[in-house]
Amino acid sequence: MRLLLFCLLFVVTFAQVRAQPKPTARQLAWQQLETTAFLHFTVNTFTDKEWGDGTESPAIFNPTKLDARQWIKALKDGGFKMAILTAKHHDGFCLWPSKLTEHSVKNSPYKGGKGDVVREVAEACREYGLKFGVYLSPWDRHEPRYGTADYNDYYKGQLRELLTNYGRIDEVWFDGAKGENAKNMSYDFAGYWAMVRKLQPQAVMFSDAGPDIRWVGNESGNAGETCWSTIDTTGLAPGKADAAYLNRGDANGPVWIPAETDVSIRPGWFYHATEDSKVRTPANLVKLYYESVGRNSLLLLNIPPNREGLLAESDVASIRNFRRILNETFRKNLVVKTSRLTDGKLSTFVDVEAGKPLEIQLLGEQLIDRIAIQENIENGQQIINGQVEYWDGRTWQPLKTFTTVGYKRLIRFPEVRTAKLRLLIKQAKGPVQLAEVGAYKAATGEN
């Protein structure tokens, strides 16, 4: 009888482990990008608005010095791995010469109506080795068919143009934002998503609650202190979601939809000259990195081109120094090298039992104030909470507690001098596969 009960318990436990939600290959590749960039650019740049109303004349769009290579080189130097362009914002103006509307660059002064900003950015991304993504707003304040069933066909036609004419696309952004007085419109998101899957199967898709990645619930740049990659999508839809729920995720969520933390380097999403003195500092951007990437999310930072069609030097300098600080901080892992915990691979790991401390040796006595922990999320997210201790030469001292880990948890604390650390996973949903551990000293200028 005891043997039967043990076998039943084993079968149930094994089934629970196997049932844990796991990322798809596209989600796993996306999360490891860590930092990507938004490029908000349209007629709003020239009207000094955040949301256009759709009545803007294409004649106002004339970025006389537009240089997509300058944009993408700056992003490359800032360590960003993908650029996502607002191909069409809520105003309905298209940055490519769409055959489906006259409200586009083809009727603007830009390059005599022969310009195609989407193509220029896509080509610059290929030149500099960045991935390329597109934002296509479902809400369209210009198109007369908006609010009718015919609009879904119009939107799919525009989506098809973007997905078939510009090479590989790695992310498609479906914004759920819509004004309170907007026409009632039932979007065919299932149809939109099916088209992306067919034409660009490697691309991840963003909306408030998936299908691949979700909104983090705010535009301040902060993932939840507790942030699960799993959620329950029941009752959720683009434009209809609980921000607090999306921010923290759900330990018992049945689907893997990790959070993307979108935030702008300026107060607004589009360029405004009055905000030139309000660009986030490198130190502030580093803080955002810790509160997004360091909390199991991805940082999507908006850097908007100006009216000339260039990224402002203040913005360029800030992202360049942001990356310099991160590179300096994480240049050298002060943990003794091992074959599985310091090789930079999620697929190699150490099995860690909850409640059993793991001792971590440093490269002699070191001054540290940063710790990085990563799970092998290829097999799911398991850690609920834990703590880190350090050896003061005589006894173990508490250093920091933490909650979820997932792809990456970055832990900051006042500097201590020690030769070894002890990691204790207090609670976990299932078997923990610890993939990476690092100890670091923050660069000058980080704080």
Image (spheres, rainbow, N blue to C red):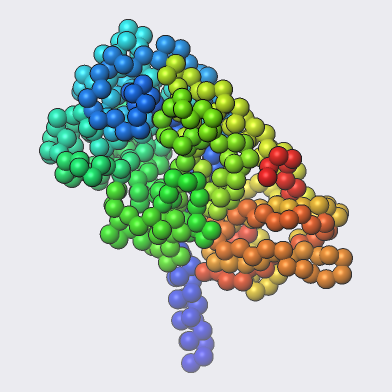
Pick the residue in front: 377 or 82: 82
398 in relation to 186, above or below: below
Point out residue 162 in the picture as x, y percentages from the top left corner: 32, 27
Left/right placement of residue 432 relative to residue 242 reads: right
Q: Quadrant of the C terminus?
A: top right
Point out residue 82 in the picture as x, y percentages from the top left corner: 49, 33
Point 41% across, 51% down: residue: 217
Point 76% across, 54% down: residue: 415
284 in relation to 54, above or below: below
Point 75% across, 47% down: residue: 441
Point out residue 200 in the picture as x, y percentages from the top left corner: 36, 35
Left/right placement of residue 342 relative to residue 408 reads: right
Point out residue 79 in the picture as x, y percentages from the top left corner: 59, 33
Is residue 435 shown to the viewer in this render? no
Report which quarter residue 106 is drawn in: top left
Left/right placement of residue 283 relative to residue 103 reads: right
Pick the residue in front: 370 or 275: 275
Left/right placement of residue 98 relative to residue 205 reads: left
Is residue 41 shown to the viewer in this render? yes
312 in relation to 153, above or below: above
Query: Tag count in the figure?
Result: 0
Residue extending farthest bottom: 1
Point 68% across, 42% down: residue: 446
Pick the residue in front: 357 or 194: 357
